[in-house]
Image: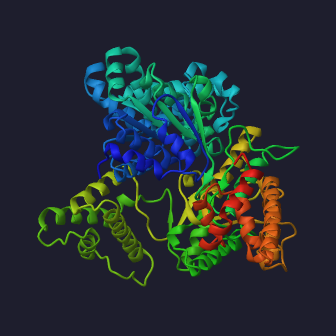
Amino acid sequence: MTLGPGQAARLLDALDPDQREVAEHLEGPLCVLAGAGTGKTRAITYRIAHGVASGAYQTTQVLAVTFTSRAAGEMRSRLADLGVPGVQARTFHSAALRQLTYFWPTAIGGRRPEIQPGKAPLVGAAARRLGLATDRATLRDLAAEVEWAKVTLTLPEDYAQAAIAAGRTGVAGIEPATVAQVLALYEKAKTERGVIDFEDVLLLQIGILLDREDIASQVRSQYKHFVVDEYQDVSPLQQRLLDLWLGRRRQLCVVGDVSQTIYSFTGATPDYLTGFTSRYQGARTVRLTRDYRSTPQVVSLANQVLARSRRGGALRLPTGAVELVAQRPSGPAVRFEAHDDDVSEAQGVVTQVQRLRSAGVPLSEIAVLYRTNSQSEVIEQALASAGIGYLVRGGERFFERQEVKRAMVSILGAARTEKESLTGDLGADVRMVLSREGWSQEPPAQRGAVRERWDSLNAIVALADDLAQTRGASMEAFHTELRERADVQNAPTVEGVTLSSLHAAKGLEWDAVLLIGACEGLLPISLAEGAAAIEEERRLLYVGVTRAREHLVISYARARNAGGRASRKPSRFLEGLWPKAEAPGTARATGKGRTGAKQAAADFEASADPATLALFEELRAWRAVAAKERSRPAYTVFADATLRDIATVKPTSLPQLSLIRGVGAVKLQEYGGQVLAVVRATAPGE
């Protein structure tokens, strides 16, 4: 697919009004405040595609910057699907490394130094020179502090004062002045070995752009339009590089969500996002609030978790936060479960997975999220004992598995040497090739290594089917896609429950999320000190909640070990939301003895905000009048459940209204305009 001028309007027709405003703003500074699930990636990829289709952009002059290789790969894939394959979508590090490698011979001469893969060996050398401990935990903490100092542009001689001001004292039990010495010796050890680290890639490229105006001009002539995703996570180091890329130009679109700021400990700061309009006078701000990912029940909980960050007075969202407005039909209530101990909680996870699987939710659409990686072990044991497959994010990478490597070799070989025997049906051809590697139509009965290998191959088959449908790719093109995905570790979906930390889950989504360990000491974690750290933990819970599309179960264990003291309490972030007086293992979002309509009404009254409750009452009043005019019972116009969903979603168009359960074609034609009028009159700001 190649874009032409006539397709620009068609691209815009695929967007909602707010996304369309983003896509139409092609020149000048633009700040997009995008809530979770509001289609931010869709908005910015369509913006780029619209710019190309309208002739405002050249594909080679656009640089889209993301924070993970996976996100960059996904953006490139979406742009290719839209007919814009030439746009550069890279991480800050990848873009800087590409430039540094290209300009090194001209700017510095010789061969670019190798990149040190990890800081621990050099940090250890520095620590030993000072007679400090070099155990694994100490080296990990010191390495993290080296990274923080570099991304915040803090020199060793300035570190002690900066660390005290930032509240970063007591790192590895070492005084800030001594940590400053470690930083200086780390840099010395790096120089002695002739290597650079990941942060040096950005620092050195910054130095070249500052020192060589000719090179800076060359870079700026190459890239004229910039898009930065996840802008709330930018660091001073990254912002400095971005400033130099831009020069005096203002062709910058940034996208971010202050409510998903969860990496402050690494030096990331939302200040650049919240201060964007001050930094770029005349910049436009667009807010994406329509949540297409999650049900009204999940969205309501997410909004309330954030709103409770303000103590005293009315509940209000923090400054700069986006209040999500659910667009999906109503779904199941959020479940809350308390268990006796960690093992019981793990067994509860198994029970929920089995329930969800029986209800038709694929294992690959179920995730178990937790605050710390150490929480996964007991979950892994429980799932394995139940014969349920799982994948741990952060474990062995998909493209490093031997069966995947062999599959890629076989696909390339078939593309080059078996052209006459290939059918041209990508899915069928990939199945034929991978059947030689052990893939079969039906999965093996046994679990363990045999099933894991089949799952890997089946993920490749599923990806082939997807690409055949969206792009009609050939076998050789499919191999290229796999190779590009391997470069950025953008793995296809593998069947099995996903186990992930909350940090690692950012940017992902599943039909069902089981969020465990929602108690004091884990969420917020006991190490979080001070108001700022506590609020970051709240945002971490918000990120976890908004990963769920439809099913959300939040649980905790009253004690760590069986028979231990039941001293744990539900997280403070769920105060007023967690059901009271629940027995272990039975806590739920709904009260006992209530079923059906009564329970749904109780859930709605307990979770809805005042504006939504007011709209519901206005809709009931309108329904009474409409029913009386037609001499019908009120429930034949719309059931209460439908009115509650309308009040929650607050549709602004007939297509949005038609998505709500209970609004059929006949009722849409008869009542649709009146319902939208009530919504507009009662919620004019929506």
For residue 181, side relative to residue 637 (left or right)? left
Q: Nearer the viewer, residue 583 or 220?
A: 220
Tell me the quarter of the picture where residue 428 sits.
bottom left
* Observer-nearest of 226 and 672: 672
**Residue 262 percent coordinates (x, y):** 62, 44
In the rendered view, does 116 fall on the left or right side of 350?
left
Residue 475: x %, y % from top left:
23, 63
Residue 109 visible from this viewpoint:
no
Across and down, in percent, residue 226 comes to 43, 33
Residue at 66% across / 63% down in the picture? Answer: 672
Q: Is residue 84 above or below residue 639?
A: above
Q: Is residue 75 left or right of residue 333?
A: left
Q: Is residue 598 visible?
A: yes
Q: Position of residue 127 (x, y in %)?
A: 54, 33
Does 266 sit above or below residue 155? Answer: below
Residue in the picture at 58% in, 54% down: 37
The residue that appears at 42% across and 46% down in the rendered structure is 9
At a point 46% along the width and 47% down the height, the residue shown is 12
The quadrant in which residue 118 appears is top left
Q: Nearer the viewer, residue 377 or 638?
A: 638
Q: Residue most toward the bottom?
A: 445
